[in-house]
Amino acid sequence: MRVIGITGGIASGKSVLSAYIRSLGYAVFDADACSVGLTRAGGEALAQIESCFGAEFIKDGALDRARMSKEVFDSPQKRRMLENIIHPLVISRCKEKMRECANEQLFFIDAPLLLESGMDEMCDEVWLIYAPERVRIERACARSGMEPQQVRKRIRSQMPFYLKKRRADHIIDNGGSLEAAMARVSRLINRALKKCGVSV
């Protein structure tokens, strides 16, 4: 099985391209969805979060995501505290999913913090989704209602593109048409299959 990590900054279109890969029948582990599940009512991460941050961050038995976002966004130290709780649990769940899919030819890990969390070490190759900042700001504002300055602040809080680029095996430009980006993904999938010995 060949493991491919997919990452990209906010509003780069990573989730759309991962959905396309999933529609082709490939297994995709969604790190964000896993993280949300870990912090829902009864979630595995809640006890540690309450211990580190306090009971006021638990609302109706689940993580108060809005309150936690405000708490950690401007504090790298607190953000690391939260990530140190969430990331090991996400990695553990990902490894479980990989074992379940051991007979698959390709397995994809969709993770915005793939590089920051060290999950790239589990991958045979890393695909980085890219879109210009202007496009990402427009997309993020349209889908979430955030103001442009809020999106810029989020972008600045993430690992810079030039650093991610150094650690990526392939760049997928998603700043233009979605069809062009999906065609690039299809070519990379065929390339990965060939590395698995599959004729395409």
Image (spheres, grey):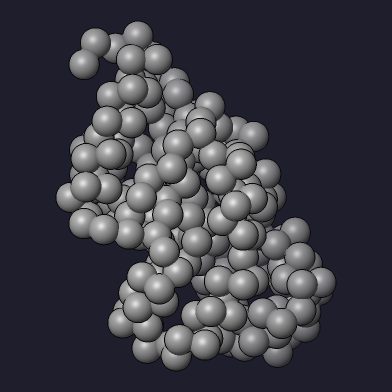
User: Who's the residue at 35% across and 37% down the image?
Assistant: 27
Residue 98 visible to an observer of this rendering: no
Instruction: Locate the C terminus and report the quarter of the image it occupies.
Output: top left
Image quarter of the N terminus: top left
Image position of 50 (left or right of 166) = right
Q: Vertical placement of 46 versus 91: above or below?
A: below
Location of residue 23 with respect to 102 vertically, above or below: below
The image quarter containing residue 175 is: bottom left
When asked about the image quadrant of residue 62, the answer is: bottom right
Please state if 195 lies on the left or on the right of 42 as rendered. left
Q: Is residue 49 visible?
A: yes
**Residue 188: % across, % down:** 33, 31
Seen from the viewer's position, the closer of residues 45 and 172 is: 172
Residue at 38% in and 27% down:
106
The part of the image, by quadrant, that contains residue 64 is bottom right
The picture places residue 98, in percent across and down from the top left corner, at 49, 32
Q: Position of residue 148 (x, y in %)?
A: 45, 86
Closest to the observer, 193 or 172? 172
* Front residue of this view, candidates 83 and 168: 168
